[in-house]
Amino acid sequence: MLPSSENRIKEILDDVMRSSPYIKAVAMARISGVTMVSVMPTYVSPEHVSAMSAVMVLLGERIARAMRSGELNQVYIKGDEGHIVMTAVGNEAVLMITAQEHAPLGLLFIEMERAAKKLRKLV
């Protein structure tokens, strides 16, 4: 990845973080699980989250294919204290966003798709 692409990805992820006070973290990883860029709290290991996010998206794609549900759009996890949403960015990367429990999911999904569309042009 070119340094200019990495800077642009960072700008897009920073825009996602600023788009909602409910968003706690955002990361983009290669489908291999390697972190490309992340904006995360210090208590989170971007490497671990990236690797697990890539695996979740790959498994989601396999389940969607097995169930004949069409192409995977998102993988969604709901925890007691928030939401985690992952989506493929082309065939090469995964975008992951975490948000607080009371985040408006519709706006979160819209913001994620908007970011993914921009990121697809960079990978």
Image: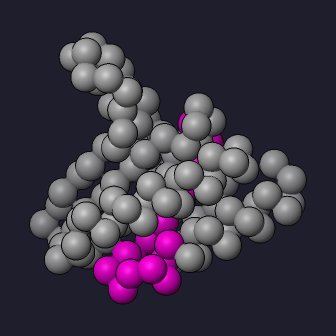
Residue 11 inside the magenta-drawn segment: no
Q: Is residue 4 above or below residue 40?
A: above
Dividing the picture into quarters, in which one does residue 60 lie? top left
Instruction: Look at the image and tell me whether residue 56 can be seen.
Output: no
Q: Residue at x 43, y 30 (%)?
A: 58
Q: Residue at x 37, y 62 (%)?
A: 110
* Total numbered labels placed on residues in the image: 0
In percent of width and height, residue 13 lies at 57, 69
Quick check: 24 left or right of 30? Answer: left
Residue located farthest toward the left when viewing the structure as drawn: 80
* Magenta residues, start to end: 16-31
Q: Is residue 119 above or below residue 62?
A: below
In percent of width and height, residue 109 lies at 33, 59
Q: Is residue 101 above or below residue 93?
A: below
Viewer-side residue, 78 vs 122: 122
Dividing the picture into quarters, in which one does residue 12 lie? bottom right
Q: Residue at x 18, y 57 (%)?
A: 78
Residue 26 inside the magenta-drawn segment: yes
Quick check: 70 left or right of 19? Answer: left
Quick check: 47 left or right of 73? Answer: right
Quick check: 15 left or right of 3? Answer: left
